[in-house]
Amino acid sequence: MSELKMNRLSRRAMLRYSAVGLAAVGGGSLLGACQTTDPNTGAPEGEGGGGLQQRADSGQPIRLAIANEPPYTKLEADGTLTGAAPDIAKAVLKRMGIENVEPKQTGYDSMIPGLQANRWDIVTAGLFMNKDRCAQVQYTTPDLVSTESFAVAPGNPEGLRTVDDLMNKDVQVAVLAGGYERRTALALGVDEGKLPTYQQAPDALQAMQDGRVDAILLPTLTLESLKEQQNANFEVTPPLEQFPTTGSGHAFRKGDQTFFEKYNQEMKAFKETQEFEEIMNQWGFDAEASRKATTEELCATES
Ligand code: 6CS
């Protein structure tokens, strides 16, 4: 049923790794048939769902939700929106003739509620697909395929290397509020009391530096980037083999079907270009892994 072909960090650089495969986690697609009504209100497309096509047609900015968590998403000090997912989104929108975009920084716990409440238009944050999320929003073709690791104190005093270690040891491991890691760890059988939540990755790092937690569970590349940005003294474990390979896409309201279809078509075409490879390489992701991944497989991840 479940065969994981996990990827490893390359030796070349902290932020580069090669994802050679994708978790084949079985189960059916949860994307289901295309919906043309808002799932919450039942209103026709564009009414309850925010009318993204109308918004684009009238030249209003397309609001992109991000976390500001490099290399997935990054907000420069001057307000420039970048990072792997927003760079891909901007390139796709440009192919659609849209250059007016606006970043909306938020936590992972607010991304889907804020999308449904029309506070932004697309989540371009490396929001990993799972059963729960795929039931609420519609995801494009995958963009970023990646892995998960622990950040631990130098020397890894608790010997945390696997999900079994997390289950068997008396440890506190920081995760993010509303994050994929928490739900997936719970689905794998980890005790809730071991997973205190923090709003952003730097908050989790502060907790580890203060000795409030023993480790942090986050994407391998997030932890490598955090270490570099903050010049912090911690170790990042090799990717956790028991954790499903993660994969994000860009998330839309189910009511914005017309715009979604065009965007998804452009994104699929963009993924075949050299420009896509350059963006992926720049941020340390693997274009081939992204091309091989499917929304259906990723949406079958237990959560
Ligand atoms: O999808 C998520 O919830 C996770 N995505 C990223 C890029 N970082 C942490 C977060 O929990």
Image (spheres, grey):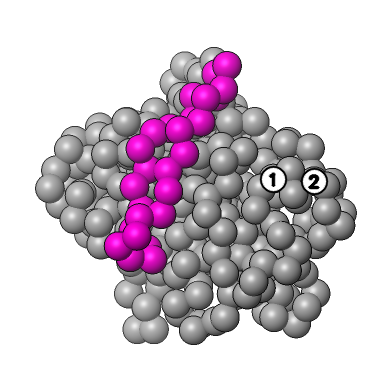
The secondary structure that dominates the magenta segment is: loop
The crowd level at tag 1 (other Cα within 10 Å; few <14, some 14-19, many 20+) is: some
Note whether 29 is above or below 12 in the view shown.
above
Residue 176 picture location, percent across and down: 66, 60
Contact (CB < 8 A) between labels 2 and 1?
yes
Q: Is residue 56 visible?
A: no
Residue at screen point 59% across, 74% down: 234
Region rendered in magenta: 1-27
Looking at the rendered structure, the secondary structure element under dot 1 is helix
Note whether 110 is above or below 80 in the view shown.
above
Looking at the rendered structure, the secondary structure element under dot 2 is helix
**Relative horizontal placement of residue 190, taking residue 57 as reference (left or right):** right
Note whether 214 is above or below 10 in the view shown.
below
Residue 48 picture location, percent across and down: 54, 38
Tell me the kind of residue under disc 1. Answer: Val
Residue at screen point 75% across, 63% down: 158
Q: Which residue is mark 1?
A: 163
Disc ID at residue 167: 2
Residue 285 magenta-drawn?
no
